[in-house]
Amino acid sequence: ETLLGKRVDYSGRSVIVVGPSLSLHQCGLPREIAIELFQTFVIRGLIKQHLASNIGIAKSKIREKEPIVGGILQEVMRGHPVLLNRAPTLHRLGIQAFQPILVEERAICLHPLVCRGFNADFDGDQMAVHVPLSLEAQT
């Protein structure tokens, strides 16, 4: 029963679309996915900057999509690379690290030239995104 699938924290999945304006080392992350992936970091940022006095208030600011949350999210994303994985992962290019960039779309954006390593195209392929937490995992 556990072989078929498990939930993984700090991860998400979405369809990929072309993002020709991105650099080869960047991927576009939808705001909805990004806020979910980096929520704990954004909460810490809100509390650290004295914009929220506790976790509950910070979560309500995120839920209400206050403008300050977007700025903190951008700042957090700048320091955290993400891993993109397209199943099946048959070789080492099936999972690669990218610098996330916020996009307003609801799909993950990729530069067309990086698709070959993933054996991906833009006809409905899905990719998983993971956030490595430790410094060791990020390097």
Image: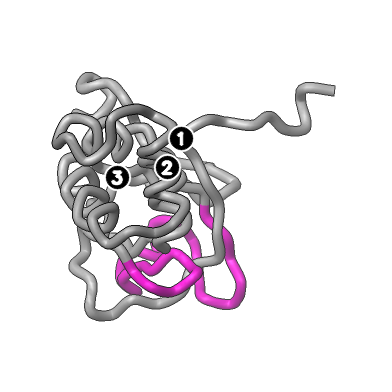
- Labelled pair 2, 1 in contact (Cβ < 8 Å): yes
Label whose residue precedes the other's in the sequence (3 or 2): 2
Can you identify the residue that label 2 sits on?
A: 37
Q: Measuring 26% from the left and 50% from the top, which residue is drawn there?
A: 73
Q: Which quadrant of the structure image shows residue 27?
A: bottom left
Can you identify the residue that label 3 sits on?
A: 97
Label whose residue precedes the other's in the sequence (3 or 1): 1
On the picture, is 27 further left or further right than 34? Answer: left
In the rendered view, tell whether residue 131 sits above or below residue 134: below
Percent coordinates x, y for residue 70 in the rendering = 27, 58
- Labelled pair 3, 2 in contact (Cβ < 8 Å): no
On the picture, is 17 further left or further right than 54? Answer: right
- Name which residue type carries label 1: Tyr
Percent coordinates x, y for residue 10 in the rendering = 46, 35
Percent coordinates x, y for residue 72 in the rendering = 21, 48
The residue carrying pointer 3 sits among few (fewer than 14), some (14 to 19) or many (20 or more) residues within 10 Å by Cα, namely many
Can you identify the residue that label 1 sits on?
A: 10
Q: Secondary structure at mark 2?
A: helix
Percent coordinates x, y for residue 14 in the rendering = 55, 59
Q: Is residue 107 magenta?
A: yes
Q: Nearer the viewer, residue 60 or 107?
A: 60
Quadrant of the image containing the C terminus? top left
Label whose residue precedes the other's in the sequence (2 or 1): 1
